[in-house]
Image (spheres, helix red, strand yellow):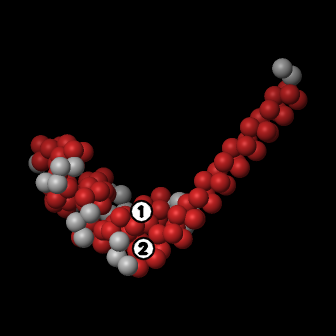
Amino acid sequence: MNSDQLEEELYFFLKKELANIKNINEEHKKTFDLLQPLVKNGNAAAELELGMLYRFGRGVTQDNDQALDLITKSANQGYTSAEFCLGYMYHHGQSVDINIEEAAKWYRRAAKKGHKLAQDMLNRVEFKN
């Protein structure tokens, strides 16, 4: 394969990959639009999902404050996945300062409901302290 052929293959590969990225971004934007009314009605699962979109900047501009607010609202409603997620965020300093006590609190809440990964993470943070 000569360099012109390689360049042409690379061009078509990159063009395909960019189209895939554009499609993924469009799907995230659709998800964002679908979640909005659910969040306004206080749906905990939707709050977590929208918070994750903000956290990673998927379909929206990344906004750590908005992510933390939505995920906290979801966790405060007792949504187990959000409790685990919030524990993880505090444990690893994602969108917040590292706070092991706060991480353990949220891991514990999720672990009491049978969340296996929360149980493992709780054991890790308690073992270190």
Q: Is residue 82 left or right of residue 50?
A: left
The part of the image, by quadrant, that contains residue 3 is top right
Mark 2 neighbour density, 10 Å: few (under 14) some (14–19) many (20 or more): some
Residue 31, position as x, y percentages in the image: 52, 64
In three-dimensional space, the C-alpha distance between marks 1 and 2, rounded to whole angstroms, equals: 11 Å
Q: Name the one closer to the observer, 85 or 32.
A: 32
Q: Nearer the viewer, mark 1 or mark 2?
A: 2
Front position in the image: 26 or 41? 41
Q: Amino acid at mark 1?
A: Glu
- Residue 49 numbered mark, or none: 1
- Residue 57 drawn at (x, y percent): 51, 61
Contact? badges 1 and 2 (CB < 8 Å): no
Task: Give the structural element (helix, strand or loop) at label 2.
Answer: helix
Disc 2 residue type (three-letter): Leu
**Image position of 106 (left or right of 61):** left
Q: Residue at x 24, y 45 (%)?
A: 117
The first of marks 1 and 2 along the sequence is: 2
* Residue at the farthest bottom position: 40
Return the x and y of residue 35 as percentages of the image width and height.
Answer: 47, 69
Pick the residue in front: 67 or 22. 22
Can you tell which mark lies on residue 62?
none
- Rendered-image quadrant of the N terminus: top right
The residue sitting at the top extreme is 1
Q: Does residue 14 appear in this view?
A: yes
Residue 38 numbered tag: 2
